[in-house]
Image (spheres, rainbow, N blue to C red):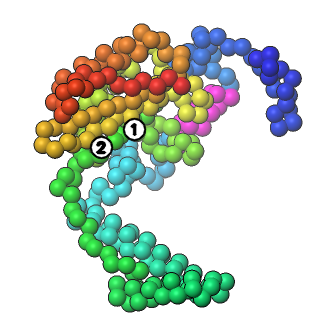
Amino acid sequence: MAKLAGLELKGKPVTLESLDDTWLLDQANGGAGATSKTKARRGLKKQKNQPAADDTRTPQERLADQVTPLWRLSYEQQLQEKTNVARDVLLGVGKQLQDLASNPSISIVQRAHLGWVSQSQTENDGLPCPMYNIVPSPITTHYRTKCEFSFGIDPSGKRTVGFLLGLVKDGFTAVLDASDCLHVSKAALSIRDAMQEYIDDHEWGPYDRIDKVGVWRLLVVKTFWSGESGFSRGWALSMPKLISMIACLQIKWLFKSILARYPRTNPRREGQAPELYRD
């Protein structure tokens, strides 16, 4: 703090104040120690987290529209929608190549190298290259191999491990339970459920993305299929340095208890504990 005393930031002198851990934990859990500015921001967040007056969707439908935008369509319709998007992208690439070929600033040699564009567009219905049909996946639900679960507060005020209902930069900080999301793997959900149970009654609150206080922040879960013998999985938990080593050991024991529920493909990594990141 002594090194920062007397410095200026954007033309204004830097003011310093020493805060103890009690104050930090009070801030993390929304206690009386929160400043008026913090409380004002909480009011703005509460307003932002509410849907528009004409939005009749449930919170779960809002979340599904965000993380799986095509969930209301049949799988065949989803494939057609993605085909249309891919075609539009290729049409845009073709137009950019045409514009480049007609640019008077390029050399004759460079223009000659782009001579294939017009011929390819003629042969491929306006596209600069052939476009093949999308190969349908045999797995249409619970297929996501990596999930990043956020810690936060749901619209009802409950601590939740799930997905954000919107972008933080737009003022959305509410987190909703991801159990009904069709793309999350069942193994990832089991880890999420265990972490949810752990934080429900824990003394530390979730990380506040606006006020920059709190503890529990991000849970990354990776699951993947390996041949026919099952799947492997790993996870990482991000949390501040003020977390004690006792809490870290408790979390490792919690996740180790989950390992027994699923067969592992690599016996040498049996009982592997999660990676814990304290930042």
Quadrant where the C terminus sits is: top right
The residue that appears at 51% across and 80% down in the rendered structure is 97
Mark 2 is on which residue type? Thr
On the image, the x and y values in percent for residue 101 come to: 55, 85
Mark 1 is on which residue type? Glu
Residue 44 located within the stretch drawn in magenta = yes
240 sits to left or right of 63: right
Q: Label 1, secondary structure: give it.
A: strand
Which quadrant of the structure image shows residue 171?
Answer: top right
Residue range highlighted in magenta:
37-48
11 sits to left or right of 111: right
On the image, the x and y values in percent for residue 59 come to: 38, 43
Say which mark, if any, is on residue 148. Answer: 1
Q: Which residue of the protein is positioned furthest toward the front in this rendering?
A: 109
Q: In the picture shown, does residue 203 fall above or below 9?
A: above
Which quadrant of the structure image shows residue 21?
Answer: top right
Residue 86 located within the stretch drawn in magenta = no
Residues 112 and 227: in front is 112
Q: In the picture shown, does residue 94 fall above or below 246?
A: below
Q: In the picture shown, does residue 78 fall above or below 204?
A: below
The residue that appears at 84% across and 27% down in the rendered structure is 7
Per the image, the residue denoted by label 2 is: 145
On the image, the x and y values in percent for residue 176 come to: 39, 37
The residue that appears at 20% across and 31% down in the rendered structure is 266
51 sits to left or right of 195: right
Circle 1 Cα neighbour tier, 10 Å, few/some/many (<14 / 14–19 / ≥20): some
Residues 164 and 225: in front is 225
